[in-house]
């Protein structure tokens, strides 16, 4: 059981790292946080969004985190270098879901896809 300390507002999403050692949570406070599941401690936070973070996903290789927000952006974060990679303009509305996959088309039928390390961020 992980008792999350540090987030003062409601959580909307979470994602487990591919190796099961990390968990990312995000929500109302617009700040995704990465937790080490072995220690229960927050090991990194990802400032940059201006509104609630509604979706997070790890890349298949586990080296990149994507976060989608009510501020209409998707941000990519390099977990090894512990820094932001880039902010991608997204839909004209909030980004409520995202995933890495092989196709290049979103579940809503809109062809938003950004190539990333042999896969696509949808």
Image (cartoon, grey):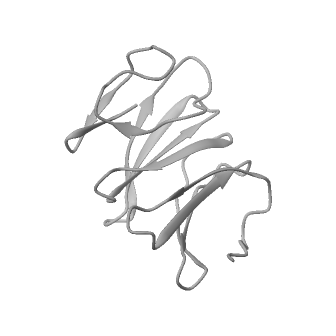
**Image height of 3 relative to 25, above or below:** below
Position in image of residue 15 (x %, y %): 53, 55
**Image height of 88 relative to 112, above or below:** below
Please tell me which residue is depicted at 79% across the width and 53% down the height of the picture. 10
Please tell me which residue is depicted at 61% across the width and 20% down the height of the picture. 93
Given residues 76 and 98, the one toward you in this image is: 98
Given residues 97 and 85, the one toward you in this image is: 97
**Image height of 41 relative to 61, above or below:** below
How many discs mark residues in the rendered view? 0
Given residues 69 and 48, the one toward you in this image is: 69
Outermost residue toward the right? 9
Position in image of residue 56 (x %, y %): 53, 47
The C terminus lies in which quarter of the figure?
top left
Quadrant of the image occupied by residue 116: top left
Position in image of residue 111 (x %, y %): 38, 16
The N terminus lies in which quarter of the figure?
bottom right
Report the side of 75 relative to 34 (left or right). Answer: left
Please tell me which residue is depicted at 55% across the width and 54% down the height of the picture. 47
Outermost residue toward the bottom? 39
Position in image of residue 107 (x %, y %): 48, 23
Quadrant of the image occupied by residue 103: top left
Please tell me which residue is depicted at 39% across the width and 61% down the height of the picture. 18
Given residues 73 and 98, the one toward you in this image is: 98
């Amino acid at each position: 059981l992980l008792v999350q300390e540090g987030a003062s507002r409601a959580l909307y999403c979470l994602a487990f790292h591919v190796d099961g050692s990390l968990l990312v949570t995000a929500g109302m406070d617009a700040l995704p946080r990465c937790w080490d599941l072995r220690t229960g401690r927050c090991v990194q936070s990802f400032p940059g969004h201006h509104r609630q973070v509604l979706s997070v996903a790890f890349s298949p290789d586990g080296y990149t985190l994507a976060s989608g927000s009510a501020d209409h952006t998707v941000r990519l974060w390099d977990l090894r270098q512990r820094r932001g990679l880039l902010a991608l303009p997204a839909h004209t509305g909030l980004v409520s879901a995202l995933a890495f996959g092989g196709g290049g088309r979103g579940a809503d039928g809109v062809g938003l896809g950004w190539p990333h390390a042999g896969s696509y961020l949808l």
